[in-house]
Image (cartoon, coloured by chain):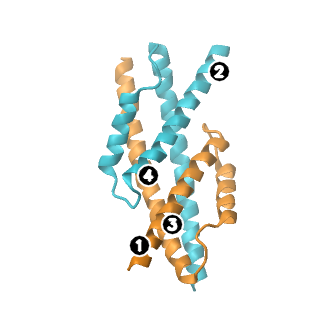
Chain colours: A cyan, B orange
Amino acid sequence: MSNEQLDKLRSELDEVNLKLLELINERARVVQEIGKVKGKQGVNRFDPVRERSMLDHIAANNTGPFETSTLQHLFKQIFKASLELQEDDNSKALLV
Amino acid sequence: MSNEQLDKLRSELDEVNLKLLELINERARVVQEIGKVKGKQGVNRFDPVRERSMLDHIAANNTGPFETSTLQHLFKQIFKASLELQEDDNSKALLV
């Protein structure tokens, strides 16, 4: 009985993982678009004020169970990876 | 014109952030349920084989723009945070 329950919860987790994967990549596409616009304007891609405001937005909307500090740590990792992706795009653009 | 475009992309990003926040917390709730079932069975919560299988599932379903290695790094951080959440639940249960 409990194993059935575990299997059910695990397939639920697999579905959530796929949705997360899709959403993280969707976020990356939006960030790439932002990078392109900023690139044309000659503006620096890293914007600590904007990052702080996104982290505050997350804090304000967190209903748990994760602590806000844990979520902010995870989002900082996502921001970092996104910035690296923009930098890759940028070096590719410079090579053209 | 470009600033309007930037504002539009930024509100898009804010929406994606909120969806991500919701989904990461939804994932945490499923993991907590799994932790409860495992706790009753006296099974160890950390399951490296299952983690590997989830990472492989992510690799198989990644369509980019993020590299699979980047996504796997992000998911490992989420797994780690989830395990810590289960451990917190466990110590709370022991205190009851």
The residue carrying mark 1 is B92
How many numbered badges does the structure rendering display? Answer: 4
- Residues marked 4 and 2 touching at CB (< 8 Å): no
> What secondary structure is marked by label 2?
helix
Distance from Cα at disc 1 to Cα at disc 3: 16 Å
Mark 4 vs mark 3: tell me if same chain.
Answer: no
Closer to the observer: label 2 or label 3? Answer: 3
Mark 1 vs mark 2: tell me if same chain.
Answer: no
Q: Farthest residue toward the left?
A: A60
Residue B17 at what x, y percent from top left?
A: 41, 44
Chain letter belonging to callout 3: B
- Residues marked 1 and 3 touching at CB (< 8 Å): no
Closer to the observer: label 1 or label 3? Answer: 1
Say which amino acid is labelled 3: Val
Tell which circle, 4 or 2, labels the residue nearer the N-terminal end. Answer: 4
> What secondary structure is marked by label 1?
helix
Chain letter belonging to callout 2: A
Say which amino acid is labelled 2: Lys
Q: Nearer the viewer, residue B63 or B79?
A: B79
Closer to the observer: label 4 or label 1? Answer: 1
Residue A92 circle label: 2
Q: Nearer the viewer, residue A16 or B72?
A: B72
The residue carrying mark 3 is B31
The residue located at (62%, 18%) in the rendering is A93
